Amino acid sequence: MAHQQTDHPAWSAETLFAGPGDTLARHRAHDWSATPLGPVESWSVELRSAIRTLLPSRVPMLLWWGPTQVQLFNEAYTQVLGDKYPEAVGQPGAECWAEVWDELGPLVDAVMAGREATYSENHLLFLHRHGYREETYWTYSYSPVHDERGAVVGIFVATADVTARVLGERRLETLRQLGTLSVTRADSAHACRAAVDVLAGSPRDLPFVEVHLDGPGPVASCGEPDVPDRAVVRRVAETQRPERAGRAVVFPLIGAGRTLGVVVLGLSPSRVFDHAYATFVELVAARVATVLGDAVAYEAERDRSQALVDLNAAKIRFFQNVSHEFRTPLTLLLAPLRSLLDEHGDSLPAGQREAMAAAHRAAQRLRLLVDALLDVARAEADQLHARQEPTDVAALTVECASMFRSAADRAGLELVVDVDPTGVAVVDQEMWARIVLNLLSNALKFTSSGSVAVALRESGSDLVLSVSDTGVGVPAAEQERIFERFHQVEGITGRNREGTGIGLSLVADLAVALGGTTSLASEPGVGSTFTVTVPRRPAGPDAAPVRVAVAELGGAFVGDARQWEPPPSATGSDDVGSRVLLVEDNADLRDYLVRLLVGQHWSVEAVGDAEAALRQARDKRPHLVLSDVMLPGRDGLALLRDLRADPDLARVPVVLLTARAGSESTVEGLRHGADDYVVKPFDPVELIARVRVHLELAQVREALIVAGEHQVSTLRKALDTRDTISRAVGITMALHGCDATAAFERLAATSKNTNVKVRDLAVDLVERFTAGLP
């Protein structure tokens, strides 16, 4: 070696490798003279300088020196060596790193040959340093050490073990890819296969993977399976606890509180199963469970959605079929009733004529409901399509509004129609008529006083219809839901409680079919304004306006409004024995019941709501109350509770009428104290029989109560008389010094002589004695 300095005690092994730590101690104790480097005292300046540079560094550094790459390294590098330490001290590089020298040797030879330094990043090396073939990753550089002549005499190796970072990034990417799996089109098995396909890209971390569901074999797998015994798989599924089995970990796949399957994750033989590795496989299993759980949930939701779609389709078919089926019997009802009224109405008795008219209105109302159901079914099926035709929209609107004129007058409301001429526009005439009729019917129903106004304007390229009222209004919290199908606002009192909750929703559907929108502005207690805005499509210059006949269409709406008329205050005579208080908000049914009850020679007082019924009952106590359950405002059950709470009315029999069939409704009415419960539609003979029975029972009950009260009064009077005579006998005994028999005989003799009753004599004697008179 050049410039060797021999026999210089300052450069002995003790001084060159001075310092604490096992690594320096091993270097001091090593027999360097047995290596190609020779005794420490003979080492060159370049070697000693390199060592002094190497040892203090906290970066793992290795020095290879000479042709055989004799090793010297610092304390930080000792951790890199593992089981190769301490044998690596002074050992040739090719011997120390024999398992990877095929990869490292060419790099070393190139540097020793004078070529440039090397730099390797994230280099994979399989090392034997912990008793097994270990997968490791390194970032390192080989830098030449020159002597004073420029020849390469050694190599500085600066290295960093980046295994943890590389594995962490790789495993994180695996988890990320698992997290991006989409299960929106996959069933459980497909989801498992998709997850396994992702895991197949990580063979160094997961050399094999199996996913088991319900079947005997795996639904998805990858790699070279070395799976544990099937009993382990079954046990993990049953206990829901993971188990280590050889070179695999078996995890339960849990979702919705149950075991969905089992995943077997193989472990790499080139990595120790440390905390980081265990955390990784736990996260993989959890993510696979999530993917599977999402797939199962999606399957369930998809099945539920399909079931809802099928149910909705079935419902739509049912509505359509029922609506069509109803039309035939309705035609057979409406046509003969109309013919009978038109041809023979004048010759019918007044009662029969009114009954036929009520039946015709009821059939019209039923047809209105059938048509509404059919439109709802079409809207649900997206089959509510407008049939555009030239229409005088203003004239059509006025005609629809005018049909409610008499109904508004009977209700005491002012109907204001303010329609601007719009000319002929292309719209669906029937849809437009239904919109106007529905909004007007709704306005009249919920307006007890004031006015209802209809306005039609052109606004730019739109037609704007507004229907305003001074009615009850809609609370702010309910306004967003007012156009929802079947939604009815609780606590709002109209002229009656009848309704299906589809009128306003149908208005919204019809407006959408016309390409428009609906809106509501309302304030409780002030009123509401419903606005429908649709595009105005001008008709061609030669288009002739076509008018839809609204008389037939509007008849049902007007007939419905007929049901809101207030009832007469009383029917019958006060001379009639039994008084029945009838509470019914539907005018036609109320009139029918009045005729039915009056025909039994009962006096009938008819009202339309619970408050009026309670006032009437308190003013003139009825013998029986016949009440509908569904009433505007407070219902029939509330009226029943008020009657039972009033001492003067508590014994009045109450018979409830309801459209709700079923034992639950009957039990509810009877539980609140009703005497009987009659379900609509009822047999009139049965209803009369029930009312008669309860009237007679009430009469018998009242007679028994009166008789009982008379007996009590008589008994009390007798007891009072006996007490007075006994006191008189006592006074006589004291005055005359005789016994009780003699005293009573004296009173009896005086009664006979004076022709005054013994009781009267006794009362006079007691009063005189009490007053101190002789």
Image (spheres, rainbow, N blue to C red):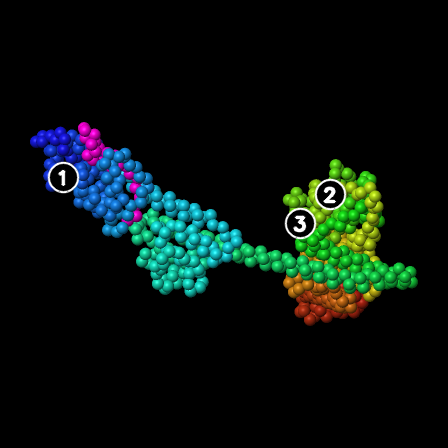
Q: Residue at x 66, y 64 (%)?
A: 662
Q: Residue at x 82, y 50 (%)?
A: 548
Q: Is residue 182 left or right of residue 459?
A: left
Report the amino acid beneath label 1: Pro
Q: Position of residue 363 (x, y in %)?
A: 79, 60
Does residue 659 appear anywhere in the picture?
A: no
Cα–Cα span, label 3 and label 2: 19 Å
Q: Residue 59 falls in which quadrant of the image? A: top left
Q: Main secondary structure of the magenta part?
A: strand
Report the amino acid beneath label 2: Val
Which is more N-terminal, label 1 or label 2?
A: 1
Whether pointer 3 and pointer 2 mark residues with C-beta atoms closer than 8 Å, the reply is: no
Which is more N-terminal, label 2 or label 3?
A: 3
- Which residue in the structure is indicated by mark 2? 534
Element type where label 3 sits in the image: loop
- Which residue in the structure is indicated by mark 1? 36
